[in-house]
Image (cartoon, rainbow, N blue to C red):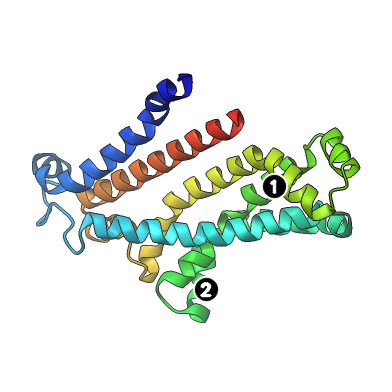
Amino acid sequence: MPRLEALPSRWLMPAAWLGLLLLAGWAMPLAEPLWQWLAPDARQLVYQRAAFFTLLGRHALTVGLAAAITVSLGIGAGIAVTRKAGRDFLPLVAQLASLGQTFPPVAVLALAVPALGFGLLPIVVALSLYGLLPVVRNTIAGLRGVDGAATTAARGMGMTAGQRLRQVELPLAAPVILAGVRTSVTINIATAALGATVGASNLGDPIIAGIVNGNTAYVVQGAVMIALLALAVDSLFSVWQQRMRRS
């Protein structure tokens, strides 16, 4: 009974941000007085080259693909360097992951476009590299923070190394790993707007169009949608982390 009573309040914040996101996508054309005030000289006040919900879907797809790659690579690398056979590579992997985030995504795009062409692929590569560091770092920290008594007990029960990893180490390290994934995804929701510069249509389109045409209303429309998406996703991760800590 206490769990059922706690459920509505736990989901209140994610539901509120998701509701505001959907409301914003629907109400953009209705807020013309606000856009007129922001961009009094603009010939067109609401971005119309694509529907905001279409741009939202493309934005979520871009970030989702990058997150799938980042999580696979980051957790895999973190596991590998915390095993006995891979410990010597821990400094190298940590430095490579740091390099991926310190290298500006714009520069990655500039280098990737000649090799990969315009479209979705260059921005997915850039986001995957940019979001790798928190996932790798938290996976290593989470696995190294597992209580030695738990793994010793598992070893005493006759578990193999693979069983200890799957049934003991990863479940205990999961909250820390999830915190890294949360940081990575939230950052990439904002960074994905750069995809509009290389032909990957998403919520960055209104922002880029607004900058090029001097239309402040376009910039605000894209920025508001991206901010609400980031807050909604971050709230969902927060609920997931709370449930994980209680289980």
Task: Locate residue 5: give its quadrant.
Answer: top left
Quick check: 12 left or right of 242?
A: left
Amino acid at dot 2? Ala
Residue 77 is at least partly visible in this image? yes
Quadrant (top left/top right/bottom left/bottom right) for the N terminus? top left
**75 w.r.t. 3: above or below:** below
Residue 76: image x %, image y %?
Answer: 69, 58
Residue 37: image x %, image y %?
Answer: 13, 40
Q: Residues within 10 Å of mark 1 (few under 14, many from 20)?
A: many
Find disc 1 in the rendering and name its residue.
139
Q: Which mark is residue 4?
A: none
Find disc 2 in the rendering and name its residue.
112
Q: Residue at x 41, y 76 (%)?
A: 118
The mark that comes first in sequence, 2 or 1, is 2
Quick check: 192 left or right of 160?
A: left
Asked which secondary structure carries label 2, the reply is helix
Residue 212: image x %, image y %?
Answer: 27, 61
Q: Residue at x 39, y 24 (%)?
A: 9
